Structure formats: structure tokens, C-alpha cells
Image (tube, grey):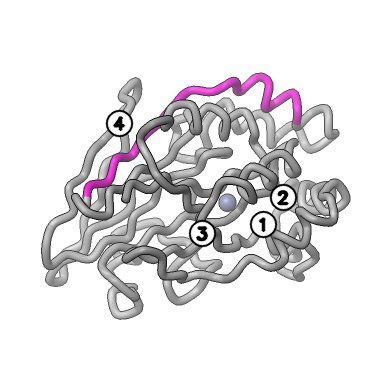
């Protein structure tokens, strides 16, 4: 089975469209690691795509915030404004879908899906030391996570932790073969709001039989996504950061 893994879509329909086009023909099923909405200007279109196309989805902190969870109190000003706006925009069906999403980790076809970390869906796993400390909590050897908006992730073996490289500037894909006796925390990066200094939309493709992960980047129409944010009268900061990839 070849899986397309998307995470942190954040209501950015232009980025999602570009990912789907770029990945066409390379996958059998789609899974989503949460944060379908929040920040961007197209919450309903993105949620509808997720409802129609994914086989497994878990919730992110923004999906909770946009459907009334008190987690919103921890958000920054612009994130809070976007959550309130999104909450007012969502159709009843889309809101219900987001409200009912399960928390990770979720087992799916031999891999595990989570938003933050295996022990806390809101925890950010940013560096190798943090990843190594999570070793006892990993539910299986292949775990996919999001939340940080940083593509790559970590390999863990016999007390050693290392980082998996994302595509370099101008590079489309980085391929990683999973090794035996190794645990992995893998991050496909953010479709809708990358924060790793590469403004291109990020996603992952994983072959469950060959145990091969491809991390990919694809350019998309950033100006149009920015326009959608500004048309919604959301904070301009949320548009600016898309161009910077941070
Ligand atoms: Zn996010």
C-alpha cells in the first residue's frame, strides 16, 4: 500500500491542490495528521476535500479550537482570531466532522498516526533529544506526526537519535529507506503553512511494503492563498508568513 500523508493543511486550498496534483499516480490511500483548518482562508473547501478523500484522520489542536474547545485560550493573537473566524465560517456538516475526529495515536495499516507526540497530542517534537525521550511511548516502529510544521522527523536506535533530511532548496524529493531494529518518528511537514524556511507545500509518500518514505515539496500559488486570507480580513501576518515559509 502506498499512502499519501498530509498534515497541517490549515485551510490552504491552493497548497492542497498543488500537493494532490504533484502526488497524482503515486499513492493508493490518503491519511491526515490533523490541523485541517485554522490560519487560512478556505476552511470549508479543505475540510470537504479531507472528508471525501482520506481513509484515516486524527484531530489537531486547531481543529479543536475551531469547534469550540478551550485549547484556543493558549493560542497567539492571530491564531485566536483565525479560530474564531473559522468557527463562524464552517458549515454544520464540516464542523461535526471536525468535532468527531479522534485523538491520536491511531493505528492504521501497520503505522501510527499522531498530531503532536505519542503521549500528548499538543506536544511539539522539535529536536533529537526530545524524540529520544519519547522512545518508551512509541506505539510501533513507524509513527507519523505533525504539529511542528517541520518536515523530516527522526530515527531512533540503541540510544542514538538522528534527523531525516527534507528536500533541499530546489529539490523535489528526498527518499529514506526504513532500517530494521529502528524506530521512526516521521514528519511529512505542513501542506498549508510550512515553517522550515521552505515556502513550498510539504507532504510525504510511504510504501508500507517496501518501507520507503519519500518526503516531497511542491510550489503552489502562494499569492492566491494570501489573497484568500486578506479577503477574509484575517491578520496580514498570516498571509506574510506563507511567503517566508516560517
Ligand atoms: Zn498546525
Q: How would you rate the neighbour count of disc 4 (Cα within 10 Å): few for under 14, some for 14-19, many for 20 or more?
A: some
Residue bearing the label numbered 4: 173
| Mark 3 or mark 2: whose residue is earlier in sequence | 3
Rounded to the nearest angstrom, the CA distance separating label 4 from label 1 is 28 Å
Could you tell me which secondary element the residue under label 2 belongs to?
Answer: helix
Whether 80 is among the magenta residues is no
Could you tell me which secondary element the residue under label 3 belongs to?
Answer: strand
Residue bearing the label numbered 2: 79
Q: How would you rate the neighbour count of disc 3 (Cα within 10 Å): few for under 14, some for 14-19, many for 20 or more?
A: some
Mark 1 or mark 3, which is nearer to you? 3
The stretch of residues the image draws in magenta is 212-228
Q: Is residue 81 above or below residue 203?
A: below
Question: Tags 2 and 4 in contact by the CB under 8 Å rule?
Answer: no
Mark 4 or mark 1, which is nearer to you? 4
The image's mark for residue 62 is 1
Q: Going 35% across and 43% down the picture, which residue do you hit?
A: 205
Q: Going 35% across and 35% down the picture, which residue do you hit?
A: 26
- Label 1 CB sits under 8 Å from any ligand 1 atom: yes
Residue situated furthest right in the rendering: 88
Expressed as whole percent of the image width and height from the top left, the position of residue 71 reads: 71, 68
Expressed as whole percent of the image width and height from the top left, the position of residue 184 reads: 27, 61
Residue bearing the label numbered 3: 56
Mark 3 or mark 2, which is nearer to you? 3
Mark 2 or mark 4, which is nearer to you? 4
Whether 226 is among the magenta residues is yes
Residue situated furthest bottom in the rendering: 136
Could you tell me which secondary element the residue under label 4 belongs to?
Answer: strand
Rounded to the nearest angstrom, the CA distance separating label 3 from label 4 is 24 Å
Amino acid at each position: 500500500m502506498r499512502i499519501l500523508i498530509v498534515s497541517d493543511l490549515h485551510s490552504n486550498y491552493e497548497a492542497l491542490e498543488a500537493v494532490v496534483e504533484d502526488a497524482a499516480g503515486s499513492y493508493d490511500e490518503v491519511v491526515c495528521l490533523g490541523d485541517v483548518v485554522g490560519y487560512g482562508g478556505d476552511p470549508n473547501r479543505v475540510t470537504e476535500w479531507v472528508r471525501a478523500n482520506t481513509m484515516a484522520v486524527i484531530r489537531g489542536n486547531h481543529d479543536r479550537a475551531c469547534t469550540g474547545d478551550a485549547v484556543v485560550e493558549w493560542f497567539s493573537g492571530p491564531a485566536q482570531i483565525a479560530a474564531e473566524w473559522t468557527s463562524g465560517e464552517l458549515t454544520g456538516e464540516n464542523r461535526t466532522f471536525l468535532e468527531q475526529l479522534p485523538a491520536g495515536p491511531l493505528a492504521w495499516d501497520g503505522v501510527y498516526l499522531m498530531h503532536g507526540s505519542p503521549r500528548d497530542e499538543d506536544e511539539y517534537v522539535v529536536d533529537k533529544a526530545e524524540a529520544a525521550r519519547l522512545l518508551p511511548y512509541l506505539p510501533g516502529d513507524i509513527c507519523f506526526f505533525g504539529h511542528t510544521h517541520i518536515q523530516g522527523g527522526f530515527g531512533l536506535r540503541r540510544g542514538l537519535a538522528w534527523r531525516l533530511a527534507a528536500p533541499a532548496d530546489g529539490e523535489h524529493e528526498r527518499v529514506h529507506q526504513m532500517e530494521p531494529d529502528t524506530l521512526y518518528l516521521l514528519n511529512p511537514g505542513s501542506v498549508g503553512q510550512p515553517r522550515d524556511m521552505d515556502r513550498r507545500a510539504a507532504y510525504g509518500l510511504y510504501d508500507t511494503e517496501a518501507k520507503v518514505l519519500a518526503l516531497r515539496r511542491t510550489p503552489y500559488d502562494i499569492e492566491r492563498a494570501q489573497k484568500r486570507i486578506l479577503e477574509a480580513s484575517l491578520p496580514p501576518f498570516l498571509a506574510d508568513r506563507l511567503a517566508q515559509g516560517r
